[in-house]
Amino acid sequence: MKKERIIIVGIGQHAQMIIDNIDQIKNIEIFGLIAADKMDVGKKVMGYGVLCTDNEVDALLMENPDISGYFLGVGDLRIRQHLAAKYDQKIRAVNIIHPAAIVSRYAQMGNGNVFEAYTKVANGVIVGSHCIVNSFSSVNHDQTIGNNVLIAGNVSMAGKSIGDNTLIADGASIGFKKSVGRCCIVGDGAVITKDVPDYYIVYGNPARKVRDNVW
């Protein structure tokens, strides 16, 4: 089986998590990493070389036409949104599905998503692009997840929809047929019992607004 050769954009903790996941996948090969800072070029991250900076990636792709995809190795949602808009014009973002993840073949998804070990995505789920679903989280059937959404670990989702650029923190629970808007933060352990409007930051059980999220 020919492996798909990709680059990872980023070198920090999130990039290292992505490397951990890709190392378990047989059909993806990491060519190297892309850094923001010139000082990091030439370093090694978990055995993989830092090849160049963002400003030099066009030349890298020209010199290496066998690089067929990329993945965002940055966790900050604002930075991810900016980088996705830039890199999607250059090269295709790949999906990373850990062998221990359960993703229904009847789920639909865009590009650049990662599903870590022991995640579960049921039938009828629609996932956008550049989303992160961390370990032990469950997305029940017939939900719509927007673009650039981070679903942290041990999240239980029985809702209706999650808007773009939203963070669902560890241990949160989204109630049946409830929706969370775009650019929201749902805090650790929060329990969503009613719809959450755009740009809300909510915490607690039941979840309540604590302030607006400035995006």
Image (cartoon, helix red, strand yellow):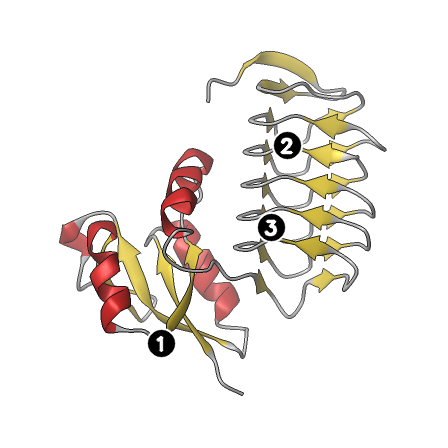
| Residue 202, quarter of the rendered image | top right
Residue 19 picture location, percent across and down: 44, 64
Q: Is residue 157 left or right of residue 50?
A: right
The relative height of residue 143 versus residue 198 in the rendered view (above or below) is below
Mark sitting on residue 134: 3
Q: Earlier in the sequence, mark 1 or mark 2?
A: 1
Reading the image, the residue beneath label 1 is: 66
Nearer to the camera, 118 or 91: 91
The disc labelled 2 sits on which kind of residue?
A: Gly
* Residue at far bottom of view: 1
Mark 3 or mark 1: whose residue is earlier in sequence: 1
Say which label, 3 or 2, has the lower sequence index.
3
Q: Amino acid at mark 1?
A: Asp
- Distance from label 3 to label 2 (Cα)? 18 Å
Contact check, label 1 and label 2, Cβ < 8 Å: no
Which residue lies under the disc numbered 2?
Answer: 163
Mark 3 vs mark 1, foreground winner is 1
Q: Crowding near pointer 2: few (<14 within 10 Å), some, many (20+)?
A: many
- For the N terminus, the quadrant is bottom right
